[in-house]
Image (spheres, helix red, strand yellow):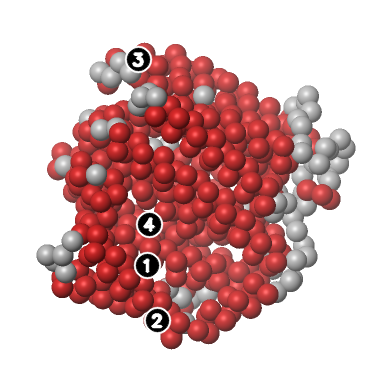
């Protein structure tokens, strides 16, 4: 896909035929691309959590949060503008590439200069060296913005899957190798940079695109409105303000426990909802002027996400007290209630990813930005208010906050798909009911095996929960499953 012309290129247009088929194939490949980093990431997470202490885990998490600020302020939203815009030309691609890479260079230099001051303020001298290493991600992630946008826009999810799998394999290999040689925190830091480098190389090769030496002010102007608001959205969702504030207010040890729970949440979210994220945004963007198909695609996606995410996160909360010590070690027992609190957020996130895709795909990045800005401001306030109460009360308060601020998104969604609120919420009734019965059956098994071996109790609980949930979904949700299968078989 070497592009030379300045006019719009039909090869870069949204799909108009075979979108359902492309979406299903894309979901499959996105599942592959989500599973690979989740599985390898879990392997790395398991290895590092057994070697590193909560304090060491926390200092790397704090350095990563500082580096994430660089990623957050970078103009990554212009990547989404390339995906959402009806027609783009090579000049748009070149302009966004040089915008992203130029900004990344300035941001990286600023983070390197700030590292000694951050280390002095926090009292952690290791940050002087850790921040420049981890912050190198900014350079490679931003250089990959345009080729990644091309792959998503053209729904080339197979190539995305191969790229992601390669990057995950490289990151895991680097981390485990360095860990085996006793490099500790440096193994975890180096793996993040290695993953970004591999992602950049893989994206450039998969997209078969090379930037031209031009920067077109008119092209930037055409993308500016959507790109700026999407950059704002990216800033708010990327920046780890909660981790930064917890690290500053409670210290590395508490941040280690919080970061541990957050990492488990992130791995599961990437695995369960990551596949729907890219596919849904590309598909819903192509359906901007087809409201009936838009509603149907969105509701089927929401149903598919909820029947998988609800039992997984609820099940993790149910078995966390047995699972965490067995898998990660007794030194992570203190993270169990935090993990359980994050499971509630997992249920909301599974729904929220599709809500975000819908709202942004319909050209309303500004509305989503203002919503996220308000949510982030209240989150900062909550951290300051509840940090003195301890980590668990703070986490619970953040969960309650997310439940409350989720309600405005329901109004945004029902307006876009032209559907009554109760009818929309009713689409989640079946997975919610099945999850409740699953919880009851799992709890009864746990209570009957209170004095049994933890591994036996864990296996029995998971088995009973899975059987009860599956039975309810098959008995009461057969019609919806048929609709989902029918969508898979469609070619239009």
Q: CA distance from mark 2 to mark 4?
A: 23 Å
Q: Give how far across and how far down residue 24 sits, in percent.
A: 64, 65
In the rendered image, the quadrant that contains the N terminus is top right
The residue furthest left is 451
**Residue underneath mark 1:** 311
4 or 3: mark nearer the eye: 4
First along the sequence among labels 4 and 3: 3
Q: Earlier in the sequence, mark 1 or mark 2?
A: 1
Q: Secondary structure at mark 1?
A: helix
Report whether 229 appears left or right of 464: right
Instruction: Using the rendered view, name the quadrant where residue 344 is placed.
Output: bottom left
Q: Residues within 10 Å of mark 3 (few under 14, many from 20)?
A: some
Q: Is residue 430 left or right of residue 444?
A: right
Residue 152 position (above or below residue 197): below
Query: Which circle's residue, 2 or 4, is located before the other in the chain?
Result: 4
Q: Residue at x 87, y 37 (%)?
A: 5
User: Residue 199 bears which disc, if any?
Assistant: none
Instruction: State the residue position of label 2.
Output: 471
Residue 471 in view in this figure: yes
Mark 1 or mark 3, earlier in chain: 3
Q: Label 4 to label 3, Cα distance in Å?
A: 35 Å
Residues at discs 2 and 4 in contact (Cβ within 8 Å)? no
Which dot, 1 or 2, sits closer to the camera? Answer: 2
State the CA–CA distance, disc 1 to disc 3: 45 Å
N-terminal of the two: label 3 or label 2? 3
Q: Are marks 3 and 2 in contact (CB under 8 Å)?
A: no
Counting from the top left corner in percent of width and height, residue 402 is at 34, 54
């Amino acid at each position: 896909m070497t592009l030379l012309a300045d006019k719009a290129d039909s090869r870069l247009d949204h799909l108009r035929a075979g979108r359902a088929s492309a979406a299903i194939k894309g979901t499959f490949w996105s599942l592959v691309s989500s599973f690979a980093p989740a599985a390898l990431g879990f392997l790395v997470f398991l290895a590092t959590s057994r070697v590193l202490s909560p304090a060491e885990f926390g200092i790397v998490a704090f350095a990563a949060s500082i580096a994430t600020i660089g990623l957050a302020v970078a103009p990554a939203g212009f990547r989404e503008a390339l995906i959402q815009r009806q027609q783009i030309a090579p000049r748009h691609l070149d302009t966004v590439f040089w915008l992203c890479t130029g900004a990344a260079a300035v941001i990286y230099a600023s983070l390197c200069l700030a590292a000694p001051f951050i280390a002095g303020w926090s009292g952690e001298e290791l940050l002087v060296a850790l921040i420049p290493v981890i912050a190198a991600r900014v350079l490679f992630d931003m250089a990959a913005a345009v080729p990644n946008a091309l792959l998503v826009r053209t729904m080339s999810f197979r190539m995305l899957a191969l790229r992601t799998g390669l990057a995950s394999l490289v990151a895991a290999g680097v981390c485990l190798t360095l860990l085996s040689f006793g490099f500790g925190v440096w193994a975890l830091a180096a793996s993040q940079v290695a993953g970004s480098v591999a992602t950049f190389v893989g994206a450039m090769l998969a997209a078969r695109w090379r930037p031209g030496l031009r920067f077109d002010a008119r092209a930037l102007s055409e993308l500016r409105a959507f790109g700026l608001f999407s950059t704002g959205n990216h800033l708010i969702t990327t920046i780890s303000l909660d981790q930064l504030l917890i690290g500053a207010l409670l210290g590395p040890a508490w941040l280690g426990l919080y970061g541990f729970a957050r990492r488990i949440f992130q791995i599961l979210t990437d695995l369960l909802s990551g596949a729907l994220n890219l596919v849904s945004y590309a598909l819903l963007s192509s359906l901007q002027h087809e409201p009936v198909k838009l509603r149907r695609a969105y509701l089927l996606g929401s149903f598919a996400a909820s029947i998988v995410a609800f039992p997984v996160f609820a099940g993790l909360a149910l078995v966390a007290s047995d699972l965490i010590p067995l898998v990660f070690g007794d030194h992570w027992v203190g993270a169990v209630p935090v993990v359980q609190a994050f499971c509630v957020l997992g249920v909301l996130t599974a729904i929220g990813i599709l809500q975000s895709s819908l709202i942004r795909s319909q050209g309303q990045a500004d509305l989503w930005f203002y919503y996220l800005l308000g949510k982030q401001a209240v989150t900062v306030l909550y951290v300051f208010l509840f940090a003195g109460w301890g980590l668990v009360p703070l986490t619970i308060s953040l969960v309650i906050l997310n439940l409350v601020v989720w309600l405005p998104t329901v109004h945004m969604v029902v307006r876009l798909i032209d559907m009554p609120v109760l009818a929309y919420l009713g689409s989640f009734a079946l997975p919610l009911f099945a999850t409740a019965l699953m919880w009851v059956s799992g709890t009864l098994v746990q209570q009957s095996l209170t004095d049994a071996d933890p591994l036996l109790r864990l296996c029995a609980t998971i088995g009973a929960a899975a059987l009860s949930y599956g039975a309810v979904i098959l008995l009461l949700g057969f019609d919806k499953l048929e609709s989902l299968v029918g969508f898979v078989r469609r070619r239009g």
